[in-house]
Image (cartoon, rainbow, N blue to C red):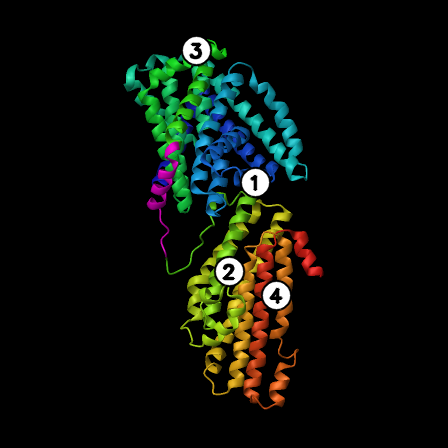
Amino acid sequence: MFKKSLYPLFLLLVAYLLFSSSDTQTIISGIAIFLIGMVFMEDGFKLFSGGILERVLTNSTKTVPKAIGTGFLATAIVQSSSLLTIIVISFLSAELITLSGAIGVIFGSNIGTTTTAWIVSSFGVKIKIAHYAMPMLIFGVILRFNKASSYRGLGNILVGLGFVFLGIGYMKEGFESMKAGLDLAQFAMGGYLGVFVYILIGAIATVIIQSSSATMALIITALATGQIEYVNALALAIGANIGTTVTAIIGSLSSNENGKRLAVAHLIFNVATALIAIVFLYQLAYSVDIISSYVGIDEKDYAMKLALFHTIFNVIGVLAVAPFTSKLVVFLQRLFVSVKEDVLKAKYLDNVVIEVPQAAIKLIHKEVVHLYDNSTEVLSHALSLHRHKYLGMGEKIGSIVETSIKPIDTNIDHFYEMKIKSLYSEIINYSTIAQDHMNSEQNIQIYSLKVACRDIVEAIKDVKELQKNINRFMNSNNADIKIEYNHIREEIVKTLDGINSLRYKRSEFDVLANIKILEQNLDKLDMMGNGRIDHLIRENKIDPKMATSLINDSAFAYDMSKKLINVATILWIKDEDIRELGEES
């Protein structure tokens, strides 16, 4: 409500600034173009990387130092801390990286964002950078029409860079024109009062613009054209760092516990870094002067000095906070604890990452496994068994089934409504929206996962038909019918146990081999085909009513087991070629 009520006022303020002065109009246009460029670059790297960034993050976050280095390099290359944060949240939700690794990436990302300041201060305020924008835009647009996703991604990156350069040019032009009629430097305040005022301005500007990179570009161009003093620019840079955490916190409100944990970690890091920078502001400024003289930065080149200051205080922040990462992890895990609800909710799906195809696929896959695990609970209870008693028991399963004859009070309809239906609906809805951002190959993967969900739900409906007769005939005086229903229960349980073992196999060829064995064992449930029913009828061991019940229930058991094996194939054989090999054999 607060954001909705302020939004019209914000639009009115922007409209007033646009029409009050041609200079402010140029500056605001520059900010808008810069932000459009950042969006194009982010989308471009999503297409161009082809999942490389995700693979790098998975393999390079085992330790905090590695994670910090990965976060720095990734952000410096893709020029988008928001894209990196989105992928980190998705991987954390999917348990592909640890919380400490994710926090390390965020720490490194903060250092990586300082590269924007170096680019702007090195090129944007010294040369007519806008001249390079047009060729980038032209080649970028041409590449965007290519069918290959990598070329389209490269096209988006070039278009993004073109808009970024164009935006910097507009901001610089606006400030240079404004200087002739108004000198903002005359309003600058000395001492710590001025520091705190400009920190607040920097934070508010970043919250409004929703990009610390754009804020830094604005600060540097204003500094380079003499609109603000150097010390005040340092304070604005500190404020921009604080402001970007507000954006992260607002974005995490709709996220899961992992998103909230990372947002708080980001806040703690940036506030701690800001406090260090404020307390030692003048000492850091003096250090920048000394370092500048050694690295060849001109004494009057305040834009470059600001970029150096921005890097130094972020590095100091990492050095100060990183040693306490393990304690921070413990604090965050206690701060946000998952609340158990009667209605089963998605554990991994996160709207923050829904537009990142590779990340979204991983989360959907994880959620389908979550759905499968919950379905095996009701399947087992319907068979009068508990999962922990038979999983991993191998040859002992037969005796476990024989001794587990007491019915477990399970209302399958209620379980389906509370534990399955809501989660199934969430997965289908999330998958459908995510597909809007995917290519044909990725859409095929999502379709397979949707099929897996459907088979899981249908398996539950099949076991509902079985449950009634299992409970009825397990207490029958006819020993033969009890043997047959124990046989059905045993074969289903062996299938569930076999599927459970697949997730621990490293080779997908091993998974395929075990799935073929499970498929061959399905013949034991085909009582019409294997002659088992005929034998029982000829020997008068069961009456006609028992026979028809057994025929129907064995068919339900066969169909259910076949669907579960299909689910296992989709979930634990990701290589399409290996999966097709299994279908051909």
Q: Are marks 4 and 2 in contact (CB under 8 Å)?
A: no
Question: Looking at numbered disc 3 in the image, what kind of residue is underneath it?
Answer: Ala
Taking the magenta stretch, the answer to whether it contains residue 290 is no
Question: Looking at numbered disc 4 in the image, what kind of residue is underneath it?
Answer: Leu
The vertical placement of 473 against 281, above or below, is below
User: Who is closer to the viewer here, 570 or 321?
Assistant: 321
State which tag comes first along the sequence, 1 or 2. Answer: 1
The vertical placement of 271 against 424, above or below, is above
Q: Residue at x 64, y 85 (%)?
A: 534
State which tag comes first along the sequence, 1 or 4. Answer: 1
The location of residue 379, given as percent across then percent down, is: 49, 68
Q: Which residues are magenta?
A: 323-340
The vertical placement of 482 against 517, above or below, is below
Question: Where the C terminus falls, by quadrant?
Answer: bottom right
Question: Looking at numbered disc 1 in the image, what kind of residue is underneath it?
Answer: Arg
Q: Residue at x 34, y 24 (%)?
A: 276
The location of residue 551, given as percent across then percent down, is: 59, 80
Figure label count:
4
> Pointer 2: what residue?
372
Asked if residue 538 lies left or right of residue 209, the reply is right
Single out the residue that lies furthest toward the bottom.
540
Whether residue 39 appears in this view of the structure is yes
The location of residue 488, given as percent across then percent down, is: 55, 75
Q: Residues within 10 Å of mark 1 (few under 14, many from 20)?
A: few
Single out the residue that lies furthest toward the right.
584
Q: Residues within 10 Å of mark 2 (few under 14, many from 20)?
A: many
> Pointer 3: what residue?
180
Which mark is on residue 55?
1
> Pointer 4: what residue?
518
Asked if residue 305 lies left or right of residue 1, the reply is right
Which mark is on residue 380?
none
C-alpha distance separating marks 4 and 2: 17 Å
